[in-house]
Structure formats: C-alpha cells, structure tokens
Amino acid sequence: MIEKFLVGGYTKRDSKGIYSFLLDTEKENLTDLQLVTEINGATYLTVDKTQQHLYAVVSENGEGGMAAFSFDGEKASKINSVTAPGASNCYVAVDETRNLVYGANYHLGEVRVYKRLENGALELADTIKHEDHHGPKPEQKGALCHFSNLTPDNRLVVCDLGNDAVYTYAVSAEGKLSDVKIYHSQAGSGDRHITFSPDGKHAYLACELDSTLEVLTYNNGEFKLLQKITTLPKTHVGFNGVAAVRLSADGHFLYVSNRGNDSIVSYKVAKDGASVETLGWTATEGNIPRDFNFNKSEDFIIVAHQDSDNLTLFKRNKLTGALTLAQKDFYAPEGTCVFPL
C-alpha cells in the first residue's frame, strides 16, 4: 500500500516550505519528496478531515501567525494568513465541530483561536496571553505556550513550557476562551506536548526541560499526577530536550522522542492507563528528532530530524511495541512536523 504524508519545518537553510512524501508499506521505504507549497517557517501543520484545507504556522514580513491553504492532495494554494507582530505560532489544530483553528505562540506566551470561514480562510476570534509565573530554568523567561489542542471532552488544552503548567479552557461556539483550570508540574519540568488515553481518563504529558513523562488522570478539565518517569537511559550525559509524544490507538504503547540523546523511548501502558513501564530506547539515526508519527495501520513510525535533514522509517511490532529500523537516509530538509494524510 502507498500512503502519503506531509512534512513541515524550518526554512533557515535548504527547505522551501511544506513537502509531501510516500510510504510504500510493502517495500518498507520512503520515496518521492515533492514540494507542496512554498511557505516560510511552517514548523507545524495540519489538514482538516475533508482534506480540502491545510493550515500551517507561518512567518511573514517580521510577523507570525497562521496560514490557510486550499489543498488538492498534491499542491496547496494560499487562501489567506492572519499574522501579528513578533514570532510565529508553533502549533496548529483544527476543531471540526466548532469550525475553529487553534494556535499556540511559544515566544509570546499566547493562545490564539481562529474562525474558519466558508472558503477555509481564517479570521482571528480570540487571543489569551498567559501571565508570567515562569519556572526556574534559564529557558523559562516567561510564559511559553507550546501546544493547543482539544481534550476528549472538547475543551482546549494548552501546554505552557515556561510556566510548567497545563491550562484547560472552555470554548464557546464563537471561539472565545473562558473558565481556565491550571495544572502545575514540578518546577523546571517544561510542559511541552500532551496526549490522551482512548477512554479519555488519562493523559500523558511530555516535559521538555527535565526529560520526563508525566502520567495524569483527567476529569472535567482537571489533571492530577499519578507517575513521573524519565525519558532517558542512565548512561546519557549532556543536553537533552524532549519533543513529541504519541500513543498507539489501542492505548497499549507510548513513544517519546529525545533530542540530544537522539532516540525514541518506548513505554508499555498499564491496562488501566494509570502507569507506564519503560521498554527501551531506539536510536533515531539522525540529529534532533523533533517529531514523529504513525502510518494509518500503525505498523510504521516515521521520524523527522531538524538538524540532519533526514526522515527515518521504523517498522513497529504492534504486539510488543518494539521498533526496527527500515530506512534512515531519506532526505527531507529541516523537518519538525510529520502529518499522515
């Protein structure tokens, strides 16, 4: 079977924007890198469920924000962009029910909500700036919003790396945010990305700055800590920054990427979802594995490397969770986001 993916990333060196590539599941290899659209700084992207519109973070003329594109599966044509002075967003997610798009702005410590118009264009609906109750580490100079997406009960969850906190907001039909609840991690954790168990009762929080994974309960917008576990082997020394976290659809296996150790750590999730057990580490065969994702059947994982300009393909054993290297030298420049179509 042939499956298509998108990869976005920085455009500081060789990348021109957003690319597509193919996975051949029978031959177990990646092929056919193609430019989908030229765009500056598309470090995160998503496509709506109809696959007619693509949304990506963007930097334009010294401003940052979100761009909307029509998408035919091959090429993307820009509809519009909504930007503001300062740095770009770093995350994007679509709310199909409310017809909204969410953005997290890291450097400005802001959550942004955009309305989707009938033609797919975006219009700013709300902006919330987090207060600066920042953590103790040098990187935590203020609020740093790194993730904004939906909870299982259709609230908005935002990870704030600077404040060591996870915020949950109620969202109105018009895209206005209210009724915030805040979960605080251990100081210096650097809350980055979060994912939820299939039953919605547990969440798994990737903490960038202390290289840990937190297992949390989730109920009615509130989180409580059950377990905090390292993402690193005991032999690691020097820098590491946790990046992406992905949970298999059956809820049995969890994966987190380490930048510095340049590995993916695999965990087995307890049957009740309330704890994880470390299975081991797999070298990603590249520098700075910023993001990774499953294919449709979850028989494969594809890893994007920001600094070594390559994608790595791993075959995944769905019974044991183990990863086996299939391909490591597929060129894709400055990759920071992998999205399956």
Image (cartoon, rainbow, N blue to C red):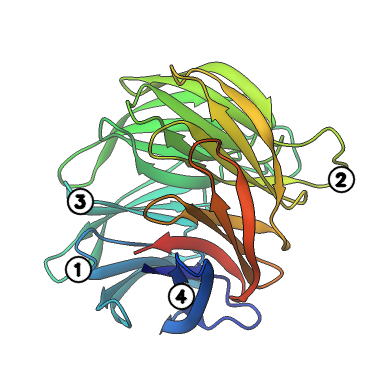
Residue 120 marker: 1
Query: Which residue is tagged 3?
Result: 96
Comes first in the chain, label 1 or label 2: 1
Q: CA distance from mark 1 to mark 4?
A: 24 Å
Q: CA distance from mark 1 to mark 2?
A: 45 Å
Q: Please state the horizontal and vertical placement of residue 287, each as a whole percent of the image.
A: 73, 62
Q: Are marks 2 and 3 in contact (CB under 8 Å)?
A: no
| Residue 283 percent coordinates (x, y) | 73, 52
Amino acid bearing label 4:
Phe
Q: Which residue is mark 4?
A: 21
On screen, 130 above or below 116? above
Q: Secondary structure at mark 4?
A: strand
How far apart, in angstroms, are the residues tagged by discs 1 and 3?
12 Å
Q: Earlier in the sequence, mark 1 or mark 3?
A: 3
Q: Give whichever of 247, 221 is nearer the camera.
A: 247
Q: Residues within 10 Å of mark 4 (few under 14, many from 20)?
A: some
CB contact under 8 Å: marks 1 and 4: no
N-term mark: 2 or 3: 3
